[in-house]
C-alpha cells in the first residue's frame, strides 16, 4: 500500500477507540450550549473557533450563570494554557515542515491528538509526522463537530429534571482523576477544588479562577518541599 | 447582524486557516449577542496562540524554560478540580445538609469509576444513573 496512506490510516485507526470518550463529551458540549441559553450558531462557533472541550464547557457554564464575559474569557484561557505544554513537546517533530504547514497542524492540537502522536513517534521513527498526526487529529475534529451539533438538537428536547448538564462535571472528573498522578499534582487538585467550593459565593463567579490559581501555587510549593 | 462580534470574526478569519464559505454559513446561523461572539473569538485566538506557540518558535529557542514547564504541569489538575468540586458540593449551614446531596453521592460514585477505569463513558454512565437513583427514588 502507498506508505503515505498507510501513515494517515494508522492515525485514524489508533484514535478510533478514544471516540468512545469523545462522543459523549461532544454531546454534552452541545447540550450545555442550549442550557446556557445559546443556539446552534454559537455551538458551532465554539467548536470550530475554540475547538477545546474543557474550555468550551467552562465558558458555557459561566455564561449560563451570568458571569461577566471577562471572567468567561479569563477562565477559558487559563484552562487552555496546557496547550503550550503540548506545543512545546510536539514541536521538535514538526520542525521539519514549512511554516504554513506548522500553522495548520497547530490548529488541530488537542489532548488526545498530542498524546497519541508523541507516543507513536517515540515508538516508530519511520512514521510521517504530519500524516499520522492529521489522521488522528482531523478524525477527532470531525467527530467533535458532529457531536456538538447533535448535542444541541438532542439537548433541546430533554426535560430539565433529568439534570443532563450534570454530565459536564462528570466529564471533567474523568479527566481530573488521571491528572492527579503524584503527590504535587494531587495536592494541586485537592486544594484547587476545596478553595473553589469555599469561594463559590465570590462575586463575578471568580471562585473558579481563585481555586485554580491557588491549586497551581500549592502544587509548585509541594514539589519544592519534596526536593 | 453587524455587531462588533461579527466584525471581529471577519477580521480574524480572513487571516486565519478557515475559508469564506464557512463564514457565510456562520452568518446564516448567527443569532446571538455580539458580545458572546467576541468572547468566543478572543478565547479561540488565545487558544490557537497557545497551540502554535512552540510549534512556531521551535528553532529560534532551544527549549521551554523549566519554570514554565513546571508551572504548566499543575494547570490541568488545579483547573479541573476547581471546575468539578463546586458542581458536587455546596456548603450548607450543617454538615448533614452538606453531605446529604445526591450530586455529592453521584460524584463520589463516578469518581471511584474514573479512578478504576479512567474511562469517560463509564464515568458519565455511573454518575448519571446514581444521580437519577437518588433524585427520583431514594430522596424522592
Image: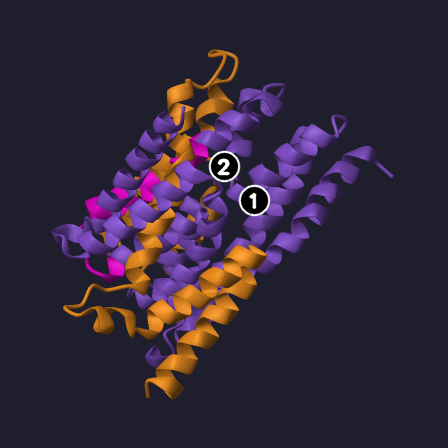
Q: Chain of mark 1?
A: A
Residue lying at the far right of the rendered structure: A1
Out of A20 and A130, give the one closest to the viewer. Answer: A20
The numbered disc on residue A30 is: none
Residue tagged 1: A112
Chain ID for purple: A
Q: Colour of chain B?
A: orange
Between the C-alphas of marks 1 and 2, the distance is 14 Å
Residue tagged 2: A107
Q: Secondary structure at mark 1?
A: helix
Mark nearest the camera among 1 and 2 is 1
Label 1 crowd (10 A; few <14 / some 14-19 / many >=20):
some
Relative to A146, is B16 above or below?
Answer: above
Residue at horizontal 56 percent and vertical 37 percent from the top: A114
* Image quadrant occupied by the C terminus of chain A: top left
Relative to B73, is B53 above or below?
Answer: above
**Residue A10 at x, y percent in the picture:** 74, 42
Q: Do the dots labelled 1 and 2 sit on one chain?
A: yes
Tell me where the magenta segment starts and ends, as one range. A63-84
Q: Secondary structure at mark 2?
A: helix
**Residue A208 at x, y percent in the picture:** 25, 49
Amino acid at each position: 500500500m502507498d506508505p503515505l496512506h498507510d501513515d494517515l490510516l494508522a492515525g485514524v485507526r489508533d484514535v478510533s477507540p478514544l471516540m468512545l470518550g469523545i462522543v459523549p463529551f461532544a454531546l454534552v458540549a452541545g447540550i450545555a450550549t442550549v442550557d446556557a441559553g445559546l443556539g446552534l450558531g454559537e455551538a458551532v462557533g465554539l467548536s470550530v473557533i475554540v475547538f477545546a472541550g474543557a474550555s468550551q464547557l467552562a465558558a458555557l457554564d459561566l455564561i449560563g450563570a451570568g458571569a461577566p464575559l471577562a471572567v468567561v474569557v479569563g477562565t477559558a484561557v487559563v484552562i487552555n494554557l496546557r496547550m503550550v505544554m503540548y506545543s512545546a513537546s510536539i514541536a521538535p517533530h514538526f520542525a521539519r515542515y514549512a511554516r504554513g504547514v506548522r500553522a495548520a497542524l497547530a490548529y488541530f492540537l488537542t489532548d488526545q491528538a498530542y498524546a497519541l502522536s508523541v507516543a507513536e513517534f517515540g515508538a516508530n521513527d519511520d512514521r510521517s509526522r504530519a500524516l499520522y498526526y492529521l489522521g488522528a487529529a482531523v478524525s477527532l475534529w470531525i467527530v467533535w463537530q458532529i457531536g456538538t451539533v447533535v448535542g444541541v438538537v438532542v439537548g433541546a428536547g430533554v426535560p430539565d429534571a433529568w439534570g443532563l448538564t450534570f454530565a459536564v462535571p462528570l466529564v471533567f472528573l474523568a479527566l481530573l482523576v488521571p491528572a492527579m498522578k503524584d503527590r504535587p499534582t494531587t495536592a494541586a487538585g485537592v486544594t484547587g477544588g476545596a478553595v473553589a467550593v469555599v469561594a463559590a459565593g465570590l462575586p463575578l463567579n471568580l471562585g473558579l479562577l481563585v481555586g485554580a490559581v491557588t491549586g497551581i501555587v500549592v502544587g509548585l510549593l509541594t514539589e519544592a518541599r519534596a526536593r | 447582524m453587524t455587531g462588533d462580534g461579527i466584525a471581529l470574526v471577519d477580521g480574524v478569519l480572513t487571516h486565519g486557516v478557515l475559508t469564506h464559505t464557512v463564514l457565510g454559513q456562520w452568518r446564516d446561523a448567527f443569532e446571538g449577542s455580539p458580545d458572546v461572539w467576541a468572547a468566543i473569538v478572543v478565547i479561540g485566538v488565545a487558544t490557537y496562540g497557545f497551540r502554535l506557540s512552540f510549534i512556531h518558535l521551535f528553532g529560534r529557542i532551544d527549549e521551554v524554560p523549566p519554570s514554565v514547564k513546571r508551572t504548566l504541569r499543575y494547570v490541568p489538575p488545579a483547573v479541573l478540580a476547581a471546575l468539578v468540586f463546586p458542581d458536587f458540593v455546596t456548603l450548607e449551614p450543617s454538615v448533614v445538609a452538606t453531605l446529604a446531596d445526591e450530586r455529592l453521592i453521584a460524584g463520589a460514585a463516578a469518581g471511584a469509576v474514573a479512578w478504576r477505569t479512567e474511562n469517560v463513558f463509564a464515568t458519565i454512565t455511573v454518575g448519571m444513573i446514581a444521580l437519577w437513583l437518588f433524585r427520583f427514588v431514594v430522596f424522592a
